[in-house]
Amino acid sequence: MYTESLVKFGKVRSEIRDLFEYGMKRKAEIGEENVYDFSIGNPSVPTPQCVNDAIKELVDTSDSISLHGYTSAQGDAMVRKTMADHLNKKYGAKVSADNIYMTCGAAAALSIVMNACMQPGDECLVIKPYFPEYGVYIERSGAKVVEVDPEDKSLQIDIENVDKAINEKTKAIVINSPNNPSGVVYKKDKVEALCEILKKKEEEYGHPIFIITDEPYRELIYDDIELPYLINYYDNTFSCYSYSKALSMPGERIGYVVVSPKIANYEDAYAAVCGSGRALGYVCAPSLWQKVVAKCVDATADISIYKKNRDLFYNSLTEMGFECVYPDGAFYLFVKAMGEDSRAFSAKCKEHEILVVPADSFGMPGYVRVSYCVETKQIEDALPAFKAVAEEYK
Amino acid sequence: MYTESLVKFGKVRSEIRDLFEYGMKRKAEIGEENVYDFSIGNPSVPTPQCVNDAIKELVDTSDSISLHGYTSAQGDAMVRKTMADHLNKKYGAKVSADNIYMTCGAAAALSIVMNACMQPGDECLVIKPYFPEYGVYIERSGAKVVEVDPEDKSLQIDIENVDKAINEKTKAIVINSPNNPSGVVYKKDKVEALCEILKKKEEEYGHPIFIITDEPYRELIYDDIELPYLINYYDNTFSCYSYSKALSMPGERIGYVVVSPKIANYEDAYAAVCGSGRALGYVCAPSLWQKVVAKCVDATADISIYKKNRDLFYNSLTEMGFECVYPDGAFYLFVKAMGEDSRAFSAKCKEHEILVVPADSFGMPGYVRVSYCVETKQIEDALPAFKAVAEEYK
């Protein structure tokens, strides 16, 4: 009667959501300060002042019909030019307004791109660990998810594993760096090796293999490391961006796709993105938000708190004997579950009022995701509880 | 390489857009006041003051993390309650917050619902004339569009034609009242007869036949007539609403789906809507806009201008000998093309600097759509040109 796969997507409860709701209940029982909730990846620092200033300025000075009216389907032309100029300045990308398609956030961007370039029979590689929604979008496009193991411990891209996973059905690979849930930033040499292998396979099979990037954590990098901007490395790239994390406004749903100007059959590629957005019901990205992000294009929320949290958390847990993946970016610490079973470990943490997410749904059983987009005090307060957990496993 | 149907949707230029762009060029050549552009259905009255007031109040008084953060996927609970209360007060509907799913406008609502309840092999009825995007969403869901002729001249639902069009594959019918492009409001007795026929066919074929409403023009009714609220008439109804027209903010993309509490297998129906929104990449409707429309739930833009325009335009054109469908709502006048060929008629109008859209893409060749969401002066100025067109056909 209803579309079975969609009923399933609507009913499956996520472990993250379940933990979060347990946390709400538990906080009501024993007090908020006594529950150490590291379950949810919501930005915890306010939007920068420029966001609210831009909103008010636009409302006070714009004609309401043009401010709140339709933009063109691909986004306001001036907004797209601002995005392109920003990318050219920041990454030396050579893109123009015509390569940009504004979207309702990165989720919309990914769904639009995946439907635009994949059909039933195609395969799409994802590198573990990966955000489970990729599977939902890929499945809806009709393609099949193929999981690829990363390098042991570092969780960098394992080039040999990618090589082995590609076959003639491979249409695309999703690259998410900094990574949710591991915080890992893929290094330049790994990215270069990946692009080389993909180019070789494209020649072998005689069709493009697209890189689809998911870059919401692009601005959240804490050390002096270079983030390779994929469009500069590989022609057949669709890049998906969101302001959710950079400007701490995930509910507002604003981001964009960049279609590489060098992608195969460019005109068809961009038309497929436009047609996909249209067919999925997007019309245009929210008009006010397009104009706000154009005004705040160089701003980010105060991410120094995340860096402070990362350093404190990583150093403290490592010292206690936890095996943690070193996160260069995002706001997640990926911790090996003591005792190997991540669900049992998460349950043990719960006994100590610590909420952490088993990484099974990210394709990596044996790990938990610890979100450190929280107040630093929560981490400080939680450390004795983590110590107690570690003691129990000794 | 790319999804063929989506490349097509991205490349097909709409006649409306083409005319609009011609208009822009022509205005630059001969002066804005000398081109009578009735091509585009963009609201021409400002958003009511309460919208901008609500935005500023929310920005000034809310915590930014909760204002701009994720809401639950189906929408903020308080916002959904406000929507339900409003519908119960206005239409005596018996719906609750749990029946509401907030969306990025009516287009998203329609796309989400159509994917939720239709699969390849299904058929979906649309009553002519109809908004061409329905065809795009229906096709993407895998179902087939079946066009149904309306009653002659009145363009009301022709019950006999609906009866004939239904077969065992029929899964849904789209009802858009007030109608784009005709402005017709379907009368209560027609709606009742439609529901009766659908119930009979549901029994005959042993499965639900859903009504999917598209209600962006619901608030734009100019006479003292009753708009039947479909959920009160028919159990298997998904109702799709948008604030685009009522609050003059089509670019902001905010609206909702109501899943009738009496729909077949309610739990699955609502889950399918949630799962469909998730799989299409929606995450949640823009957070700020959810809260703004909740604050402006009883407001509308000043629609008295549209009524004035309708009266002037309908009366003047009828007097000149044009055959017009009387529009009870929306902001379109549907005019029979003199000489029968709507494209030739539109071209003739163009010679007189009048831009009107041939209704071929709405499934009704032989008519043109004349948008009267313009300043009244433009209509007054255009009347001599319309008279000249009529003279040429005499």
Image (tube, coloured by chain):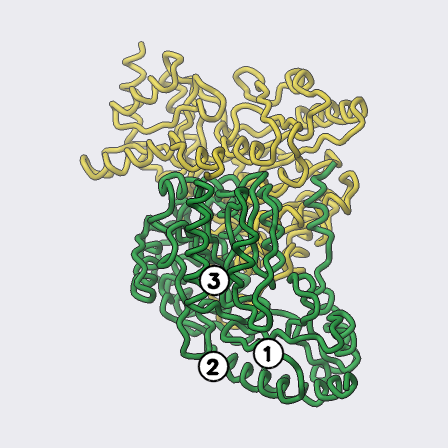
Chain colours: A green, B yellow
Residue B17, by quadrant, is top left
Image quarter hosting the C terminus of chain B:
top left
**Residue B186 % position (x, y):** 60, 28
- What residue is disc 3 on? A215
| Label of residue B305 in the image | none
Q: Is residue B159 left or right of residue A22?
A: left
The mark found on residue A374 in the picture is 1
Q: Mark 2 belongs to which amino acid?
A: Ser
* Pick the front one: B158 or B207: B207
Q: Dot 3: few (<14), some (14–19), or many (≥20) neighbours within 10 Å?
A: many
* Front residue (pair A229, A169): A169
For marks 3 and 1, the one nearer the N-term is 3
- Label 3 close to label 2 by CB (< 8 Å): no
Tell me how far mark 2 sits from mark 1, CA to CA: 12 Å
Q: Give the numbered dot on residue A304.
A: 2
Residue shown at the point (56%, 42%) measured from the top left:
A122
The kind of residue on which mark 3 rests is Glu
> Which tag is nearer the camera, tag 3 or tag 1?
3
The percent position of residue A224, horizontal first and vertical second, equals 40, 78
